[in-house]
Amino acid sequence: MRRRARTWQTALTLAAGLLASAICLGLATGAASSETLTGLVLSSNSVMLVGAVVSLEGFGSVTTDAAGRFAFHNVPPGNYRMTVSQQGFPDDKRLILVRAGRLNKVWIVLAGAAPRAPTAMAVGVPIVQRGGAIFVRGRVNEQVETLFLVDTGATLCVLTKATADRLGLTASPVSTLVTVQSASGSFEASLIQVDLIQIGDAEVRSVDAIIHDVPNLPPTVGGLLGMSFLNQFKVEIDQEEGVMLLSR
């Protein structure tokens, strides 16, 4: 009887241990599978939409903040229906895939243009990140659309010679020579004035710039977006959300 009792006691102890391990494993797995879903809501003319209602199937609704951002926490991986509503815009309905162990981020562009943002509000511009560099898409003189390398170390904006040629811009023989500081060093060039540079819904007129081919700049990039444009705004770069916020 003693031997049988010990056998049952040993079996119960092992079973309890296995059950505890299974519970701990289940809890750990559940914790690891809870993800955060973040996103941005903006208009087709790149204005961040404040107060948009974002509904996620099974998780209720949230509203976007002053920069158009929203977040849902503790979302298990899987497919979910999302609806985004904002007064004056058609609803956006889509299927969202939340993946385990990934950065789950979604951009929602509502059809239609928003009024130009008041000066107290930010204009959001999507950024492209390549290595440690940040690029934005812009237009010059309402003629040429190109990528700009954002360079807060450059005192002036820079247009490549190819971009200047497309715009018909040249430096005058009597142009002022200036020394330009950039992240890659300093150099001299002739000063020109660009009538208009537009980055998303933000624009600056009569922008001081130079024409110069920056070493190692990819051919798809038309220049540097320097401080002669950027110092007209308060600039915030949110790399996690992939956006540059410009406000006056």
Image (cartoon, rainbow, N blue to C red):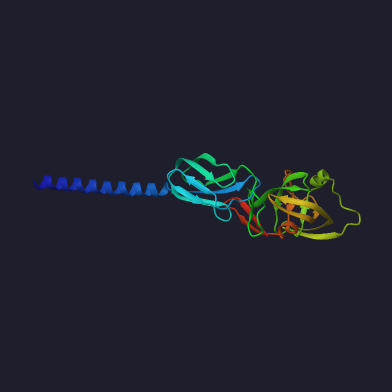
Answer left or right for 161 relative to 45: right
Residue projecting furthest to the front? 88
| Quadrant housing the N terminus | top left
What's the residue at 62%, 46% (across, down)?
43
Image location (x, y in percent) of residue 163 = 79, 46
| Quadrant housing the C terminus | bottom right
What's the residue at 77%, 48% (across, down)?
140
Q: Name the foreground residue: 140 vs 56.
A: 56
- Where 144 falls versus 151 (above or below)? above
What's the residue at 57%, 45% (across, down)?
107
- Where 111 falls versus 65 (above or below)? above
Residue projecting furthest to the left? 1
Q: How many marks?
A: 0
Image location (x, y in percent) of residue 68 = 57, 52
Image location (x, y in percent) of residue 73 = 46, 51
Answer left or right for 43 relative to 2: right
Q: Is residue 35 visible?
A: no
The image quarter containing residue 112 is top right
Q: Is residue 197 visible?
A: yes
Q: Name the foreground residue: 18 vs 31.
A: 31
Image location (x, y in percent) of residue 83 = 51, 43
